[in-house]
Amino acid sequence: MKQAIVARTDIGMGQGKLAAQVAHASLSAYEKADKRTRDQWKSGGQKKVVLKGEGERQLHELSEIAESRGLPSAVIRDAGHTQLESGTVTALAVGPGDEDVVDRVTGELSLF
């Protein structure tokens, strides 16, 4: 079991903003998973990776692919309280799900 979080590299998020957006994405996608998947991922150590995303379009495309493969996903938009304008897409979480299925969606991306 694995979860992949894709964070945009093109919007200049600071380290703290990046960490917060990755956390929002991880939790949001986790909450969309069914109970069996959540329990299996939690008992297996909650494996996750953070990957580099090129832009908003890429995150939406990956989200559509994930959903077509039955994976929970969550596109995160910033609230606009600090560094970014309200509604800016910052991150996408794919999974938790079977590692090989998650990798078929995000496996070509580089580690952040």
Image (tube, helix red, strand yellow):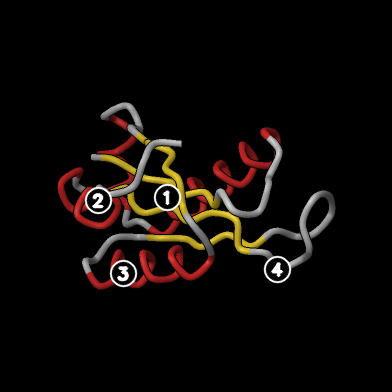
Dot 3 alpha-carbon crowd within 10 angstroms: few under 14, some 14 to 19, many 20 or more: some
Whether residue 45 sits left or right of residue 85 in the image: it is left
Q: Sequence-wise, which precedes: disc 1 or disc 4?
A: 1
At x 75%, y 60%, the residue is 79
What is the three-letter code of the residue carrying label 3? Glu
**Residue under pointer 3:** 67
Q: Secondary structure at mark 4?
A: loop
Closer to the eye: label 3 or 1:
3
Mark 1–mark 4 Cα distance, whole angstroms, equals 21 Å
Q: In the depicted view, which residue is nearer to us: 64 or 108?
A: 108
At x 42%, y 43%, the residue is 51
What is the three-letter code of the residue carrying label 4? Gly
Q: In the depicted view, which residue is nearer to us: 7 or 55?
A: 55
Q: In the depicted view, which residue is nearer to us: 93 or 8?
A: 8
Dot 4 alpha-carbon crowd within 10 angstroms: few under 14, some 14 to 19, many 20 or more: few
90 to 86, vertically: above or below = above
**Residue under pointer 4:** 87
Mark 2–mark 1 Cα distance, whole angstroms, equals 13 Å
Closer to the eye: label 4 or 3:
4
Closer to the eye: label 2 or 1:
2
**Residue under pointer 2:** 102
Locate residue 100, reporting x and y percent.
15, 47
What is the three-letter code of the residue carrying label 1? Tyr
80 to 51, vertically: above or below = below
The residue lying furthest to the right in this view is 81
Q: Sequence-wise, which precedes: disc 2 or disc 3?
A: 3
